[in-house]
Structure formats: C-alpha cells, structure tokens
Image: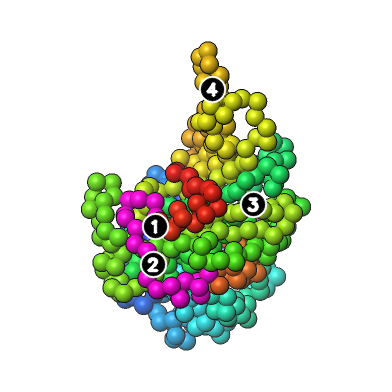
Amino acid sequence: MVIFGVTGDLSRKKVMPAIYDLANRGLLPPGFALVGFARRDWADQDFAQIVHDSVREHARTEFREDVWQQLASGIRFVAGDLTSDESFDELKRTVDELDANRGTRGNHAFYLSIPPGLFPVVVQQLKRSGLADSNPDAWRRVVIEKPFGHNLESAQELNNIVGEVFPSGSVFRIDHYLGKETVQNMMAIRFANNLYEPIWNANYVDHVQITMAEDIGIAGRAGYYDGIGAARDVIQNHLLQLMALTAMEEPTSFQADSVRIEKEKVLSAIVLPSDLTAHTARGQYAAGWQGGVEVRGYLDEDGIDKKSTTETFAAVRLDVDNRRWAGVPFYLRAGKRLGRRVTEVAVVFKKAPHQIFSPASTQELSNNAMVFRIQPDEGMTVRFGSKVPGTALEVRDVTMDFAYGDSFTEASPEAYERLILDVLLGDPPLFPRHEEVELQWKILDPILEHWTTLGQPEQYASGGWGPHSSYDMMSRDERMWRRP
Ligand code: BG6
C-alpha cells in the first residue's frame, strides 16, 4: 500500500494504526509493504519512526515488538513532489523492488489521503509512470477520502478524473461510517431477523431521527472545515448513508452491487421539503462550557474568518417518496460542541391506534421507539410501555437494551481496519459508488444554495443541543428531538 499524504492527521491517527492492528490480528500477509510518499527529506527509517509513533499512540490493539518488526521490514519512503516525473519514477522503482523482494507480485493499493485538488495530478502521474497499469495477475486499486467534491458538479469532475485512469471496480471511496461495526449491524438486524421488517414502514413508523452529535469543536482543522461546514462534512456522506441503510429495501444478496442498487433507489427517492427555511436549520457554536471547561466560539477559533458563515450544526427534514415511507419524515442533525458525543438512528413508531387504558394512566407513555446506538455505548434500545408495579394501572416508558459489550467479549475493530482490509481483499460492499455520492450531492445542493442566501447562521451555546431554529423545525411538525 502506497500512502500519499502521510504527514496528515488522518494517516497518523487512523490509517497507520489500522494497518498495524491488522498485522497484529494476523490479517496481513507477511510480505505486506507500506510505502510513504511526501515532500520531506526522510529516509526509510525516519518514516518508519513516524509510523511507529503513530502506532504507539493510536493503535487499538497492544504493541508487540515481533509484529512491529515484521511490518517495519516492509516500510519504505519516497521523498518527492506530486508534480515531478522523477519522483513517480522513483516510486515505481521502489514498488518494483518490493514486488521482487517481498512477493507483493504487482498488487498495489494507492491511498490518496490528500486534498481533492491534488487528485488530478496524482492519478495522471500514476498513469504516466505505469503504476496504475493492472494486468490479469496483478491488481491496482485507488482509495480516496472525502470530500468527494463540494457540490454535484465538482464531484462529477472528480469522478471523471479518477475514472479516466482506474476502472470503477478499482476505486474505493472511504465513508468510514460504513466500516463501523454498529452500522453494519443495522443491516444484520434488519435482514437476518423476522422481527423488525413487518413493522418497518409507514403503517407503523411515525418518523425517523438520525443524530450525529460531537462534543469536540473543529479541533485544529480550521483549514479543512471553514467553508465546508456540518452539512458537507457529515450529512452529505455519513448521515445520508445511515438514512439509506435504514430506509432501503432488502437487497437480493450482500454482494456490493445488490446493496448499492438498493441504497441508490432510496437516495433517488428522497425529496426535499418545499419550504427550506422552515424545515432546515443551521447554527454556529458560541463560546460556552463543556465538560467543566470553558471553550471558545467558532468565530474565535484559530484560523477562522471572523465573518465566517460556515455552519457547525445542520438539521434537515427529508422525505422518501415511495410506498414504504410515504408520509414518514426523516430528520437528520449533526453538530459540533453539542451536549455529548453520540450517534444514533431512532425509529419512532406511531402510537397504538386504540387505547383501552384511560388517558391518565398512559400520560407518561410516549411513542415506542427502536434506537440503533452507533456510538459510543454500541448497541440497540427498544422503548415501550409497561405497567408500573402497584395497585393502580399506570403505564410508563421502559427500555430493553442490547449492548455489544455485554453480549460479546471481542472488541469491535476500528472502521479503518475493516475498510483497509476490504481494499486489500477487493471486497467493495462497504464503499459508496460514485452514483451514490452524486445522488447525495443532488439532495444537498439546493439546501446549501438556499443557505447562502441567509447570511450568518444562528449562534448556539457550546455544550447544548443546537440552535433554536432546530427545535422550531421539529415543533412545526408537532414533534420533538430526542435528548440522547
Ligand atoms: C469525519 C468528519 O468524517 O467524522 C469529522 O470529517 C468528524 O468532522 C468525524 O469529527 C467523526 O468521526 P467519528 O468516527 O468519531 O464519529
């Protein structure tokens, strides 16, 4: 695997540690080699030291010297410039030498952990130098990280650029949410069981809430985040993928193409509300307190323009125009500096059509709900009513919980472990195809355009649950956000 962008945060915190974790779990062949490419004056040992430090700091599994030594023996570094022919020729020599000495046999994955503006030059160089040429005995794959463009048009351009060099089956777009154990479990729970599907439709479901709340701010990523905002950063990809998995029909199999076809059908059936002001909300975090610590507002963060209109909170209402979901709104919200870190998908059911108990006995009974707890505290909760012990007949909400930690002893792998392994195995079900990415932009583009006409987003207190407009959006529909 060749990584471009080895000096970035993502490589250091996620990609390199995940490679070590795979090696530690015995899932990489002994000849596996890792090549870093960057404009740094490093020798192989300097790069190996960087990988070592990142593994020590961020790997999920324990550090074992023998595993590390095996991995380190295949670590190489190519110092070079992305625009230079010589640098790529040097890279070619390096991987050829590894093929000969370590038995990698021409099987190469190129991980582009670089800004999308640099994709054209890198894929062209991979083509020119012959690095992208596959043959029946050797695969060449390219891994790309979001953002896949900043709107539909730019996403299409990017797809064309990459598609000119790599056939679509060799392009792996990372949406790391799809690598999360609990996200995959949504499919297992829906389609391996008989309990849920009969009620998974407009006859029983009132609405769905998908929440991705983070307690952190932009965490030193001003350069990436400003001008991007919450909707492009996580709704365009992670939340719309969660929505697609919640709403899709059963695929004919778990093969990549079958799953993608079903996700695409849902994404193409999504319709926007007619009044975008009333049914969307956005906000920007203001100074406040979080976990007992005083935190700065977004506009005071280092590197942020004082007049920035970038939203750090976004909420939207979407509908799915098909028979299964007619009249069932999906509410999506994501934000930074909220009350706590939690991602969940809550399917909220309609009230029982008839109640034999008096209104007084059921006043503390709310709608039944099924909640996929994506993180932290991974699992699932079912909320329903039960009789309160005693002589009176009073019904109140209770919950039934499934927690990964209680039912399984093995810890879940990190999303990047699963995804990198799938790249090496050439197994694509967990990677969105370019059609999905484009459909996701198609949904978001009109909302983003509308927001540019609205000026400054509403400020919300750090440590709270977002701007008032987000609550107003729900109360207009006579509903309430869950308090996770
Ligand atoms: C990334 C976003 O895709 O997901 C970040 O760019 C966000 O802004 C991160 O913090 C959250 O990932 P996780 O796995 O911690 O939920």
Residue at mark 2: 457
Residue behind mark 4 = 394
| Of callouts 3 and 2, the N-terminal one | 3
The residue where tag 3 is placed is: 328
Mark closest to the chain's N terminus, 1 or 4: 4
Question: How busy is the neighbourhood of tag 2: few (under 14 within 10 Å), some, or many (20 plus)?
Answer: many
- Which type of secondary structure does the marked residue at label 4 adopt? loop
Q: In the image, which residues are magenta?
A: 447-466
Q: Point out the tag, 4 or 3, that comes first from the N-terminus.
A: 3
Residue in the picture at 50% in, 31% down: 364
Marks 2/4: CA–CA distance: 44 Å
Asked if the residues shown at circle 1 and circle 2 are in contact, with their CB atoms under 8 angstroms apart, the answer is: yes
Q: Amino acid at mark 2?
A: Pro
Above/below status of 451 relative to 257: below
Q: Which residue is mark 1?
A: 467
Residue 59 visible in rendering: no
* Marks 4, 3: nearer the viewer: 4
Q: Are marks 2 and 4 in contact (CB under 8 Å)?
A: no
Identify the residue shown where x is 31% and y is 74%.
307
